[in-house]
Amino acid sequence: MAIIRGWRLIRQTSNGVFYFNCTTGQVEYSPRRKYRIEKKNAFDPTILHLRDEYREDSFDLQATLNPDEYYTLMNFITASGRLYLEYTAYNEVRSQFPVTVSQFPKCPDDLHEYTEKVKFSLE
C-alpha cells in the first residue's frame, strides 16, 4: 500500500469541470486484482481457474478540514456527474482515476466548531 500526500477531486458535468483541492490530505492506495471468471477444476477442486483479469483499486483519502470545508466536500461528492481522483506520486507522475464513493466521510464534530481529520474511501 502506497501513501501519497495531497490529492484533488474532479467532478465533470454537462455544465463544466469542478475541482476540490486538498494539498495537505493523504491518499492510501491499495491496488487489487480481480477476475470475472473463477472456476474450480472439476477433477481437483484445489486448483482454481482464473480468467478475464481486471483491476479494482481502492483509495482511502484523509484530510484535515474546517466545518465549512467539510460541507463543501460533502456537496462536491454527492453532486451529479463523473468523479475523478488525481494525485502526484513520488516520481512526479500525475495519476488520475475515475472513482466512485464506497464510504462517505463522517461528520467530525457535533457542534461543527473544530478542524478534524476526515476519512472516506473511493474505488
Image (cartoon, rainbow, N blue to C red):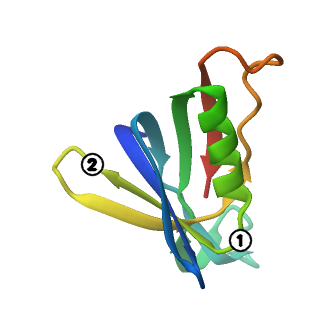
Residue at (61, 53) in percent of width and height: 122
- At label 1, counting other C-alpha atoms closer than 10 Å, the crowd grade (few under 14, some 14-19, many 20 or more) is few
Q: Quadrant of the C terminus?
A: bottom right
Q: Position of residue 84 (x, y in %)?
A: 51, 65
User: Which comes sooner in the sequence, label 1 or label 2?
Assistant: 1
Q: Position of residue 25 (x, y in %)?
A: 44, 34
- At label 2, counting other C-alpha atoms closer than 10 Å, the crowd grade (few under 14, some 14-19, many 20 or more) is some
Mark 1 or mark 2, which is nearer to you? 1
Disc on res. 80: 1
Q: Position of residue 69 (x, y in %)?
A: 59, 36
Q: Amino acid at mark 1?
A: Ser
Residue at (59, 67) in percent of width and height: 34
Q: Quadrant of the N terminus?
A: top left
Specify the farthest residue to the left: 91
Check disc 2 and report the residue beneath it.
Answer: 89
Residue at (60, 75) in percent of width and height: 50
Res. 32 in view: yes
Res. 119 in view: no
